[in-house]
Image (cartoon, rainbow, N blue to C red):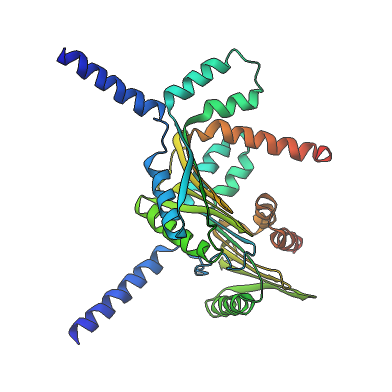
Amino acid sequence: MKKLICCTVALLSAAISLQAGNPAGYVDFGKFSPSASGGEFVEVHIRSNLIAMVARLAEKTEPEAAELLRGLKLVRVNVIGLNDENRDEIAKRIKSIRGQLDTQGWERIVTAQQKDEDVGVYLKTRGDEAVEGLVITVIDGDHEAVLVNIVGDIKPEKIAEIGERLNIDPLKKIGQKIEKK
Amino acid sequence: MKASRQTLFALALICIGSTGCFKINSDARTLRDSVTKSSRARWDEEIEIGVGAITLNLARLGLSFVDLDPEARTMLSAVRGADVGVYRTHSEPGLKEFAAMLADADQAMARRGWDRLVTVSEARELVAVYVPANVRSPSNVKICLVALNGRELVVASARSNLEPLMELAFKRQEWLRREPARL
């Protein structure tokens, strides 16, 4: 029994320390794998050291881009092609991620359900000054799901620029809306 | 006599180390082994080439007499070393195996301190790119990639100075922004 308690305590403390290692604004989407039926699958996971290195390289030629990049700590993008095998499971996972964000103090700034498209955009803010994290969830009809998590110290007025630079359409639109406000 | 043998042996070692020895390096080998093992297929080697510093410098020297596009010259000058292996199998791995292949490759590469940066998969194709987790300096960045297309597997690794390449990329981006109509 003692061993069981010790193991449980050790596992819990490991989990807590892992949680503590993640920056605010980070969301664990879990693991995704290519579908067995050969659907589209894209995963991009860019960590802070690589972002910092590119920011340093961009300093001379693109100082604005460099400043923008310096604020970022992590960029993760998942694109998962949907088919009969994974559609329900992916929809469930996205629903669960959205529920998790709602309960963890994330602000849902966009909910758009048009035709077959279901888009949710969430922000984790620190006061009025900065955005610590951004999550975009998209279920595009029957053919694909997209998850994006951008972590960093992001100025709200720079969101559109990040969308432009990283070519993320929902971000471009949201950024424009925030700028208008 | 003994001394000259030792000198020859040392020279041979230097040559093998610096030219690349026409074999892929240990990082690329780890990636290849993890993918081929989990695919449960037998893979035959078609070609394996490793190009080290001496070979690349000789190539640069040779190409200095050739009228080469400046961008191509910049790219060539940025490369510090490259390894490529091409393999073929008779029994194409099933799409179900892709997830296992990725998981095994992740595990094997993580043990050597590498992270998966990009993965793209569609139909019978799978591409995964790995970078060292502790990459800091742009002057000698290593990448490893595996590309599976049906019955063909390509494993490659490269060491490069990113600075001139990034400068090139930024110039290109600027050019595209200025002249989008040309696209």
- Picture residue at 49% right of the left edge, 32% below the top: B161
Q: Position of residue A118 (x, y in %)?
A: 71, 74
Number of residue marks = 0
- Identify the image quadrant of the C terminus of chain B: top right
Q: Is residue A9 above or below residue A49?
A: below
Q: Position of residue B50 (x, y in %)?
A: 44, 33
Q: Position of residue B108 (x, y in %)?
A: 38, 55
Seen as rendered, the residue at the extreme bottom is: A1
Q: Can residue B133 be seen from the camera position used here?
A: no
* Image quadrant assignment for residue B9: top left
Seen as rendered, the residue at the extreme left is: B2
Q: Position of residue A178 (x, y in %)?
A: 71, 63
Q: Nearer the viewer, residue B34 or A24?
A: B34
Seen as rendered, the residue at the extreme right is: B181
- Picture residue at 36% right of the left edge, 72% below the top: A15
Q: Is residue A28 left or right of residue B70?
A: left
- Identify the image quadrant of the N terminus of chain B: top left
Q: Is residue B145 left or right of residue B122?
A: left
Q: Is residue B59 above or below residue B118?
A: above
- Picture residue at 58% right of the left edge, 38% below the top: A58
Q: Is residue A181 left or right of residue A126?
A: right
Q: Can residue A27 be seen from the camera position used here?
A: yes
- Picture residue at 55% right of the left edge, 27% below the top: B76
